[in-house]
Each structure stands twice: as structure tokens, then as C-alpha cells.
Amino acid sequence: MTTSHEPPVGWDPEREEAEAEERTAHGNRGWWIFGGVAVLVAMAMVIWFALSATEDPVIVQDVGFERPGKHEIVMVFDVTREPGTTLSCTITAMDSEYGRVGTTKHEVPASAERTTRVRASVETTTTAATATADECTPVD
């Protein structure tokens, strides 16, 4: 039995190689475009997050607390914000097992100072062991 190793009629090896390279180049181009777009989107998100994090940040730092009575605790904390910004802060009192025993909203008036020390009283259902300033947000 003999087999012929003759190429098919009309077969052009150079044309076939050029077509294969063109298909590969075209396929890789799509991945490069996709990768470039993905990098641009990631950069835009990083810039957006960085800018939004610097917009008038409010920083709350717990300082301590006082217990003037069995069903009251006074939270002492510092707030740092843009001067002239009024804040609404949530103060939470907790028992010895960190269960919530009282919560109140406390408005911090605008001030010319960037950092202000605040004292906020919270009425409690039982004796509080601690308190914290959970969140302070600017008031419109």
C-alpha cells in the first residue's frame, strides 16, 4: 500500500501560515483591549474611592465615660470635622456583656474649632458598664 505525501491541489503553505498568524493576532488584540479597559476601570474606581474618602471626613474618638446615676451614663468623646459643620452622633450605652441598655442621638453644634470634646448623656434601662459614640454624620 502506498500513500501519497503530495499536498492537496491548490494548497499554499505560505498563505495558510499567514492566515493562522492573522487569526492569532486578532484573537490576542481582543484580550489586550479587554485588559486595557479593565485597567482603566480599576484606576477610575481607585481615584473615586480616594477622593470620596477625603471629602470632609468625620473622626470620632472615644475618651471615656462617667456614671452619675444608676440609670445614666455620660459619654465623653472627641469629634474632628470641618469647622462650621453640625453633627448628629449616635451614642450607645452597654452593660457588662456588651448588650445595649440605652441609645440616644446627640447633636454636636457647629464650631470654629476642627476638634471638639463632647459630653453626651444616655438614659439606660439598667446600669451601664460602658458607652461608645457609634457614628457621627453631618447634618444638612
Image (spheres, rainbow, N blue to C red):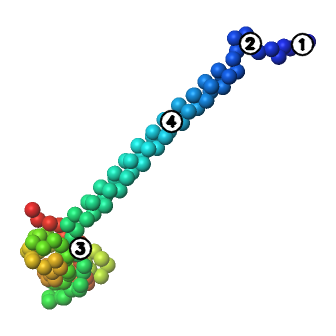
Q: Is residue 119 above or below residue 140?
A: below
Rendered location of residue 1, percent (x, y): 91, 12
Which of the labelled discs sits on residue 29, or is there none? Answer: 4
Marked residue nearer the N-terminal end (3 or 1): 1
Dot 3 and dot 1 residues touching (CB under 8 Å)? no
Q: Which residue is at 19% across, 88% downward?
A: 66
Whole-angstrom CA distance, mark 3 to mark 2, is 78 Å
Kindly indicate the quadrant of the structure image that contains residue 80.
bottom left
Q: Residues within 10 Å of mark 3 (few under 14, many from 20)?
A: few
Task: Look at mark 3 in the image and give the residue it sits on.
Answer: 59
Q: Nearer the viewer, mark 1 or mark 4?
A: 4
**Mark 4 or 3: the one toward you:** 4
Q: Earlier in the sequence, mark 1 or mark 4?
A: 1
- The correct choice, above or below, for 4 with respect to 16 in the image is above
Residue with the mark numbered 1:
2
Mark closer to the chain start, 3 or 2: 2
Where residue 55 appears, x then y in whole percent? Answer: 22, 63
Question: Helix, strand, or loop for circle 3?
Answer: strand
Sequence-wise first label, 4 or 2: 2
Indicate the secondary structure of the residue bearing disc 2.
Answer: loop
Q: Compute the Cα span from label 4 to label 2.
A: 32 Å
Disc number at residue 99?
none
Q: Amino acid at mark 4?
A: Arg
Q: Earlier in the sequence, mark 4 or mark 3?
A: 4
Contact (CB < 8 A) between labels 4 and 2? Answer: no
Q: Residue lying furthest front in this view?
A: 14
10 Å neighbourhood of mark 2: few (<14), some, or many (≥20)? few
The residue beneath circle 2 is 8
Residue 126 appears in the figure: no
Q: CA distance from mark 4 to mark 3?
A: 48 Å
Q: Is residue 68 visible?
A: yes
Few, some or many residues within 10 Å of mark 1 (<14, 14–19, 20+): few
